[in-house]
Image: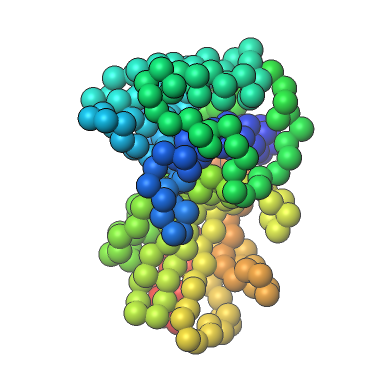
Amino acid sequence: MKAYNRIDKKIHQLSQVIAKVNRSLVPEKEDDSHTNLYFESIERRIYGRWFQQNDTKYILALDLYDFTFQLIADNKEIIKQFQIEGKNLAKIETEIADHFKTLNIRTDGLMKKLHFEIPAYAFIDSVWVKPDNIEMSKWLTYRSLANEICMLVLGLAQAKSEIRIWPHHFDTGIYCKVKSKLGVGFGLAMEDEMVNDSYFYISAYPEDYKIEYDNLPKGNWAWKINENYKGAILTLKELDNRPYEEKRSVLIDYITTTYSWIIRQ
């Protein structure tokens, strides 16, 4: 999974450019969700959110196939493409800000640091090179699966939620209320110190009561129960050498079994 985790970190860093545009131009929300992203698997783009400029709405996207940032109008016309390869991050951000000025789009805040911190990746000041197609394909597969399984969890819960990527932790995830005093979070997270691998997670968030984590259902997943986290973890290592349909089948078993246990608590 080293290749996947390496690409994950690079896309995480690039996506902060979109988060800055969201932070600066999208109407602010108290929960910071105006900075959220979305991975669209058909066009293989990471989208920000729409923002208004006079009579036109725009959105900034990261095209993972062409490896460019794209400013897109609400009729899906690509207004401007910004090449990534051969440039460092500071030059890319400057080019985007300069073009925004030509469209009279506000640029104050685009070059400022974000209000949260992400890991200080060693490559942050390096000149960007387009990722290997095979490595990128693996990233696209898992993030597409994450979108699909998020939707299946919402179907199980018969609940509504946005499937978004939070630019801080960079997990594709959802949160929804499944009972009057119980919420559920599900998603695909980056490699971290808790798991040391990228992983799918499902966790319960009870209100005004505690869940006793006894008689837990077993499977390809592991339960992590501690002061900081309580939930079931399925690492990508458990899925990596399986065909796509088998990956999907393992994930469906994972969510149906763990969700069924959670909903009864």
| Residue 93 seen in the figure | yes
Quarter holding the C terminus is bottom left
Q: Quadrant of residue 57?
A: top left
Q: Quadrant of residue 259?
A: bottom left
Location of residue 203 with respect to 118 vertically, above or below: below
39 or 58, which lies in front? 58
Residue sitting at x 43%, y 31%: 106
Residue sitting at x 41%, y 55%: 29
Q: Quadrant of residue 53?
A: top left
32 or 151, which lies in front? 32
Q: How is the structure coloured here? A: rainbow
- Find residue 50 and report its horizontal and vertical position in percent: 34, 37
Work out which residue is located at the far right of the displayed protein and give it: 122
| Residue 257 seen in the figure | no
Quarter holding the N terminus is top right
- Find residue 79 and report its horizontal and vertical position in percent: 35, 17
- Find residue 184 and report its horizontal and vertical position in percent: 44, 67
- Find residue 21 and report its horizontal and vertical position in percent: 47, 35
Left or right, residue 131 beside residue 105: right
244 or 57, which lies in front? 57
Location of residue 6 with respect to 178 vertically, above or below: above
Residue sitting at x 66%, y 45%: 118
Residue sitting at x 62%, y 68%: 229
Work out which residue is located at the far top of the displayed protein and give it: 86
Location of residue 119 with respect to 10 vertically, above or below: below
Q: Exactly how many numbered labels are in the figure? A: 0
Left or right, residue 253 beside residue 238: left
